[in-house]
Image (tube, grey):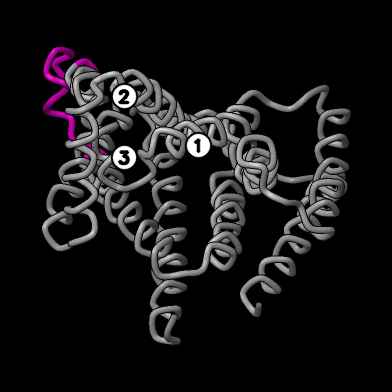
Amino acid sequence: MSTGTAARGVAVSITASVLFAVIFLLAGLLPGWGAEEIFGWRVVLTLATLACIFPFLGAARAELGTLVTRVRRRPSLLVPGVLAAAMVGVQLWLFMWAPLNNMALSVSFGYFLLPLTMVLAGRVFFADKLSVLRKLAVGAAALGVAHEAVAAGGLAWPTLLVCLGYPVYFVLRRKIGFDNLPAFAAELLLLLPLGSYFILTGPHGISSGGLGNLDGVWMAWAIGVLGGIAMALYLLASKWLPLSLFGLLSYVEPVLLVVVSWILGETLGWASLLTYGPILLALLFLAVDGRRGVLR
Protein backbone atom coordinates (compact mmCIF):
# COMPACT_ATOMS: atom_id res chain seq x y z
CA MET A 1 0.00 0.00 0.00
CA SER A 2 1.41 3.40 -1.02
CA THR A 3 1.93 6.21 1.44
CA GLY A 4 -0.47 8.37 -0.58
CA THR A 5 -3.24 5.80 -0.37
CA ALA A 6 -2.75 5.42 3.38
CA ALA A 7 -2.80 9.19 3.84
CA ARG A 8 -6.06 9.45 1.89
CA GLY A 9 -7.50 6.61 3.98
CA VAL A 10 -6.64 8.35 7.24
CA ALA A 11 -8.11 11.64 5.98
CA VAL A 12 -11.43 10.15 4.84
CA SER A 13 -11.76 8.03 8.00
CA ILE A 14 -11.33 11.05 10.28
CA THR A 15 -13.68 13.06 8.07
CA ALA A 16 -16.33 10.33 8.36
CA SER A 17 -16.00 10.35 12.16
CA VAL A 18 -16.37 14.14 12.23
CA LEU A 19 -19.49 13.94 10.02
CA PHE A 20 -21.07 11.32 12.29
CA ALA A 21 -20.41 13.61 15.27
CA VAL A 22 -21.99 16.54 13.38
CA ILE A 23 -25.07 14.38 12.71
CA PHE A 24 -25.25 13.58 16.43
CA LEU A 25 -25.04 17.29 17.27
CA LEU A 26 -27.65 18.34 14.71
CA ALA A 27 -30.08 15.73 16.02
CA GLY A 28 -29.71 17.18 19.51
CA LEU A 29 -30.38 20.70 18.22
CA LEU A 30 -33.79 19.88 16.78
CA PRO A 31 -36.25 20.38 19.65
CA GLY A 32 -39.80 19.90 18.49
CA TRP A 33 -38.69 17.25 16.05
CA GLY A 34 -39.34 13.64 16.98
CA ALA A 35 -36.55 11.09 16.61
CA GLU A 36 -38.76 9.10 14.25
CA GLU A 37 -39.22 12.05 11.87
CA ILE A 38 -35.47 12.76 11.83
CA PHE A 39 -34.85 9.06 11.31
CA GLY A 40 -37.20 9.15 8.31
CA TRP A 41 -35.35 12.04 6.68
CA ARG A 42 -32.03 10.34 7.34
CA VAL A 43 -33.17 7.14 5.61
CA VAL A 44 -34.65 8.94 2.60
CA LEU A 45 -31.83 11.43 2.02
CA THR A 46 -28.98 9.05 2.85
CA LEU A 47 -30.38 6.66 0.26
CA ALA A 48 -30.69 9.50 -2.27
CA THR A 49 -27.11 10.61 -1.54
CA LEU A 50 -25.76 7.10 -2.01
CA ALA A 51 -27.64 6.85 -5.33
CA CYS A 52 -25.78 9.98 -6.48
CA ILE A 53 -22.42 8.66 -5.28
CA PHE A 54 -22.65 5.11 -6.67
CA PRO A 55 -21.93 6.04 -10.31
CA PHE A 56 -18.50 7.33 -9.22
CA LEU A 57 -17.59 4.19 -7.23
CA GLY A 58 -16.57 1.42 -9.59
CA ALA A 59 -16.10 -1.13 -6.82
CA ALA A 60 -19.56 -0.35 -5.42
CA ARG A 61 -21.16 -0.90 -8.84
CA ALA A 62 -19.45 -4.28 -9.11
CA GLU A 63 -20.56 -5.23 -5.59
CA LEU A 64 -24.12 -4.19 -6.41
CA GLY A 65 -24.15 -6.51 -9.43
CA THR A 66 -22.83 -9.36 -7.31
CA LEU A 67 -25.42 -8.67 -4.63
CA VAL A 68 -28.32 -8.77 -7.10
CA THR A 69 -27.03 -11.97 -8.69
CA ARG A 70 -26.67 -13.72 -5.33
CA VAL A 71 -30.18 -12.76 -4.22
CA ARG A 72 -31.66 -13.94 -7.53
CA ARG A 73 -29.97 -17.31 -7.15
CA ARG A 74 -30.81 -17.61 -3.45
CA PRO A 75 -33.98 -15.66 -2.60
CA SER A 76 -33.75 -17.07 0.94
CA LEU A 77 -30.97 -14.51 1.55
CA LEU A 78 -33.71 -11.90 1.77
CA VAL A 79 -34.67 -13.22 5.22
CA PRO A 80 -31.33 -12.41 6.95
CA GLY A 81 -31.17 -9.28 4.79
CA VAL A 82 -34.46 -8.03 6.22
CA LEU A 83 -33.24 -8.89 9.72
CA ALA A 84 -30.04 -6.88 9.14
CA ALA A 85 -32.14 -3.95 7.91
CA ALA A 86 -34.23 -4.07 11.09
CA MET A 87 -31.08 -4.11 13.23
CA VAL A 88 -29.44 -1.14 11.53
CA GLY A 89 -32.78 0.69 11.53
CA VAL A 90 -32.91 0.48 15.31
CA GLN A 91 -29.34 1.80 15.55
CA LEU A 92 -30.05 4.71 13.20
CA TRP A 93 -33.15 5.60 15.21
CA LEU A 94 -31.22 5.42 18.51
CA PHE A 95 -28.56 7.76 17.12
CA MET A 96 -31.33 10.33 16.51
CA TRP A 97 -33.25 9.64 19.72
CA ALA A 98 -30.42 9.79 22.28
CA PRO A 99 -29.34 13.46 21.80
CA LEU A 100 -32.97 14.56 22.10
CA ASN A 101 -33.54 12.66 25.36
CA ASN A 102 -30.39 13.35 27.43
CA MET A 103 -28.97 9.91 26.63
CA ALA A 104 -26.10 11.07 24.41
CA LEU A 105 -23.44 10.00 26.94
CA SER A 106 -24.99 6.54 27.26
CA VAL A 107 -24.78 6.06 23.50
CA SER A 108 -21.24 7.48 23.47
CA PHE A 109 -20.22 4.95 26.12
CA GLY A 110 -21.67 2.21 23.93
CA TYR A 111 -19.45 3.33 21.05
CA PHE A 112 -16.44 3.34 23.38
CA LEU A 113 -17.19 -0.30 24.21
CA LEU A 114 -17.99 -1.30 20.62
CA PRO A 115 -14.38 -1.96 19.46
CA LEU A 116 -13.93 -4.28 22.44
CA THR A 117 -17.18 -6.17 21.93
CA MET A 118 -16.21 -6.50 18.26
CA VAL A 119 -12.94 -8.10 19.36
CA LEU A 120 -14.92 -10.60 21.43
CA ALA A 121 -17.34 -11.22 18.56
CA GLY A 122 -14.42 -11.95 16.25
CA ARG A 123 -13.08 -14.43 18.78
CA VAL A 124 -16.42 -16.20 19.27
CA PHE A 125 -17.75 -16.26 15.69
CA PHE A 126 -14.62 -16.21 13.53
CA ALA A 127 -12.01 -17.79 15.86
CA ASP A 128 -9.84 -14.65 15.74
CA LYS A 129 -6.76 -14.99 17.90
CA LEU A 130 -6.39 -12.63 20.85
CA SER A 131 -2.89 -11.26 21.40
CA VAL A 132 -1.65 -10.49 24.89
CA LEU A 133 -2.41 -6.80 24.38
CA ARG A 134 -5.95 -7.55 23.25
CA LYS A 135 -6.50 -9.72 26.31
CA LEU A 136 -5.23 -6.87 28.48
CA ALA A 137 -7.58 -4.51 26.64
CA VAL A 138 -10.58 -6.73 27.32
CA GLY A 139 -9.59 -7.01 30.98
CA ALA A 140 -9.18 -3.24 31.40
CA ALA A 141 -12.51 -2.60 29.69
CA ALA A 142 -14.18 -5.11 31.96
CA LEU A 143 -13.02 -3.07 34.98
CA GLY A 144 -14.51 0.11 33.54
CA VAL A 145 -17.78 -1.61 32.69
CA ALA A 146 -17.96 -3.18 36.15
CA HIS A 147 -17.53 0.21 37.81
CA GLU A 148 -20.20 1.79 35.61
CA ALA A 149 -22.59 -1.08 36.31
CA VAL A 150 -22.11 -0.79 40.08
CA ALA A 151 -22.18 3.03 40.19
CA ALA A 152 -25.25 3.36 37.98
CA GLY A 153 -27.03 0.22 39.11
CA GLY A 154 -26.47 -1.36 35.69
CA LEU A 155 -25.55 -0.26 32.20
CA ALA A 156 -28.07 1.95 30.44
CA TRP A 157 -30.05 0.19 27.73
CA PRO A 158 -28.76 2.51 24.95
CA THR A 159 -25.22 1.52 25.89
CA LEU A 160 -26.08 -2.17 25.70
CA LEU A 161 -27.98 -1.74 22.45
CA VAL A 162 -24.96 -0.17 20.76
CA CYS A 163 -22.15 -2.33 22.12
CA LEU A 164 -24.07 -5.63 21.80
CA GLY A 165 -26.39 -4.88 18.89
CA TYR A 166 -23.80 -3.73 16.36
CA PRO A 167 -21.55 -6.83 16.70
CA VAL A 168 -24.57 -9.06 15.99
CA TYR A 169 -25.39 -6.91 12.97
CA PHE A 170 -21.83 -7.01 11.59
CA VAL A 171 -21.45 -10.74 12.21
CA LEU A 172 -24.74 -11.44 10.40
CA ARG A 173 -23.71 -9.31 7.41
CA ARG A 174 -20.33 -10.99 7.15
CA LYS A 175 -21.80 -14.46 7.49
CA ILE A 176 -24.15 -13.87 4.53
CA GLY A 177 -21.61 -11.86 2.50
CA PHE A 178 -23.51 -8.56 2.67
CA ASP A 179 -20.73 -6.50 4.27
CA ASN A 180 -20.48 -3.72 1.67
CA LEU A 181 -22.01 -0.35 0.81
CA PRO A 182 -24.59 -1.65 -1.74
CA ALA A 183 -25.93 -4.01 0.93
CA PHE A 184 -26.29 -1.07 3.31
CA ALA A 185 -28.14 0.84 0.58
CA ALA A 186 -30.43 -2.17 0.14
CA GLU A 187 -31.13 -2.13 3.88
CA LEU A 188 -32.07 1.54 3.64
CA LEU A 189 -34.33 0.69 0.70
CA LEU A 190 -36.15 -1.81 2.91
CA LEU A 191 -36.48 0.91 5.58
CA LEU A 192 -37.74 3.47 3.05
CA PRO A 193 -41.50 2.79 3.53
CA LEU A 194 -41.13 3.16 7.31
CA GLY A 195 -39.01 6.29 6.97
CA SER A 196 -41.53 7.83 4.55
CA TYR A 197 -44.36 7.05 6.96
CA PHE A 198 -42.53 8.77 9.83
CA ILE A 199 -41.96 11.87 7.68
CA LEU A 200 -45.59 12.11 6.60
CA THR A 201 -47.00 11.57 10.09
CA GLY A 202 -44.36 13.54 12.04
CA PRO A 203 -44.80 17.00 13.61
CA HIS A 204 -43.86 18.62 10.29
CA GLY A 205 -45.61 16.12 8.02
CA ILE A 206 -48.57 16.55 5.72
CA SER A 207 -50.97 14.47 7.81
CA SER A 208 -50.26 16.55 10.93
CA GLY A 209 -50.80 19.86 9.16
CA GLY A 210 -47.34 21.03 10.17
CA LEU A 211 -45.84 21.30 6.71
CA GLY A 212 -45.82 25.08 6.92
CA ASN A 213 -43.51 25.02 9.96
CA LEU A 214 -40.11 24.38 8.46
CA ASP A 215 -38.01 25.40 11.47
CA GLY A 216 -34.99 23.14 11.50
CA VAL A 217 -35.86 21.41 8.23
CA TRP A 218 -32.45 22.25 6.78
CA MET A 219 -30.75 20.52 9.72
CA ALA A 220 -32.96 17.45 9.25
CA TRP A 221 -32.07 17.35 5.57
CA ALA A 222 -28.38 17.89 6.34
CA ILE A 223 -28.45 14.86 8.64
CA GLY A 224 -29.62 12.68 5.76
CA VAL A 225 -27.14 14.01 3.20
CA LEU A 226 -24.18 13.94 5.61
CA GLY A 227 -25.14 10.38 6.60
CA GLY A 228 -24.74 9.22 3.00
CA ILE A 229 -21.43 11.02 2.54
CA ALA A 230 -20.09 9.70 5.86
CA MET A 231 -20.98 6.10 4.98
CA ALA A 232 -19.30 6.39 1.57
CA LEU A 233 -16.14 7.82 3.17
CA TYR A 234 -16.24 5.10 5.83
CA LEU A 235 -16.29 2.44 3.09
CA LEU A 236 -13.43 4.08 1.21
CA ALA A 237 -11.35 4.19 4.39
CA SER A 238 -11.99 0.48 4.99
CA LYS A 239 -10.63 -0.27 1.51
CA TRP A 240 -7.65 2.09 1.56
CA LEU A 241 -6.34 1.24 5.03
CA PRO A 242 -4.98 -1.91 6.67
CA LEU A 243 -7.68 -3.38 8.90
CA SER A 244 -5.69 -2.73 12.06
CA LEU A 245 -5.13 0.97 11.26
CA PHE A 246 -8.76 1.32 10.19
CA GLY A 247 -9.78 -0.13 13.56
CA LEU A 248 -7.59 2.35 15.43
CA LEU A 249 -9.17 5.30 13.68
CA SER A 250 -12.65 4.08 14.64
CA TYR A 251 -11.86 5.28 18.19
CA VAL A 252 -12.01 8.90 17.01
CA GLU A 253 -15.81 8.82 16.74
CA PRO A 254 -16.72 7.97 20.36
CA VAL A 255 -14.36 10.68 21.62
CA LEU A 256 -16.14 13.21 19.39
CA LEU A 257 -19.53 11.92 20.55
CA VAL A 258 -18.57 12.61 24.18
CA VAL A 259 -17.58 16.16 23.18
CA VAL A 260 -20.98 16.58 21.49
CA SER A 261 -22.66 15.27 24.65
CA TRP A 262 -20.93 18.01 26.66
CA ILE A 263 -22.02 20.61 24.13
CA LEU A 264 -25.61 19.40 24.50
CA GLY A 265 -25.43 19.90 28.26
CA GLU A 266 -24.64 16.45 29.66
CA THR A 267 -21.87 16.28 32.27
CA LEU A 268 -19.35 13.78 33.57
CA GLY A 269 -18.45 13.69 37.27
CA TRP A 270 -15.04 12.81 38.69
CA ALA A 271 -16.31 9.29 39.43
CA SER A 272 -16.59 8.74 35.69
CA LEU A 273 -12.78 8.58 35.57
CA LEU A 274 -13.08 5.11 37.13
CA THR A 275 -15.27 4.14 34.18
CA TYR A 276 -13.62 5.93 31.27
CA GLY A 277 -10.06 5.58 32.59
CA PRO A 278 -9.91 1.78 32.18
CA ILE A 279 -11.79 2.07 28.87
CA LEU A 280 -9.23 4.54 27.52
CA LEU A 281 -6.45 2.26 28.79
CA ALA A 282 -8.10 -0.61 26.91
CA LEU A 283 -8.20 1.47 23.73
CA LEU A 284 -4.52 2.32 24.25
CA PHE A 285 -3.69 -1.39 24.42
CA LEU A 286 -5.64 -1.94 21.18
CA ALA A 287 -3.88 1.03 19.58
CA VAL A 288 -0.43 -0.36 20.42
CA ASP A 289 -1.50 -3.82 19.22
CA GLY A 290 -2.84 -2.36 15.99
CA ARG A 291 0.28 -0.30 15.45
CA ARG A 292 2.41 -3.42 15.82
CA GLY A 293 0.24 -5.09 13.23
CA VAL A 294 0.75 -2.20 10.79
CA LEU A 295 4.53 -2.29 11.29
CA ARG A 296 4.57 -6.04 10.62
Q: Measured from the top left, where is residue 67 in percent x and y?
A: 23, 39
- Residue at label 1? 99
Q: CA distance from mark 1 to mark 2?
A: 35 Å
Instruction: Point out the tag, 3 or 2, that comes first from the N-terminus.
Output: 2
Q: Residues in magenta?
A: 201-217
Q: Is residue 274 left or right of residue 158?
A: right
- Is residue 214 within the magenta segment? yes
Q: Nearer the viewer, residue 3 or 161?
A: 3
Q: CA distance from mark 3 to mark 2?
A: 14 Å
Q: Kindly identify the residue that appears in the image at 11 percent across and 28 percent down.
A: 212
Q: Quadrant of residue 124?
A: top right
Q: Measured from the top left, where is residue 232 in percent x and y?
A: 30, 56
Instruction: Point out the tag, 3 or 1, that comes first from the N-terminus.
Output: 1
Q: Kindly identify the residue that appears in the image at 39 percent across and 43 percent down.
A: 179
- For the residue labelled by badge 3, is the local secondary structure a helix, a strand or a loop? helix
- Residue at label 3? 184
Query: Which amino acid is tagged 2?
Result: Leu
Q: Quadrant of residue 11?
A: bottom left
- Residue at label 2? 77
Q: Kindly identify the residue that appears in the image at 28 percent across and 45 percent down.
A: 219
User: Are the two marked residues, 3 and 1, in contact with CB atoms closer than 8 angstroms?
Assistant: no
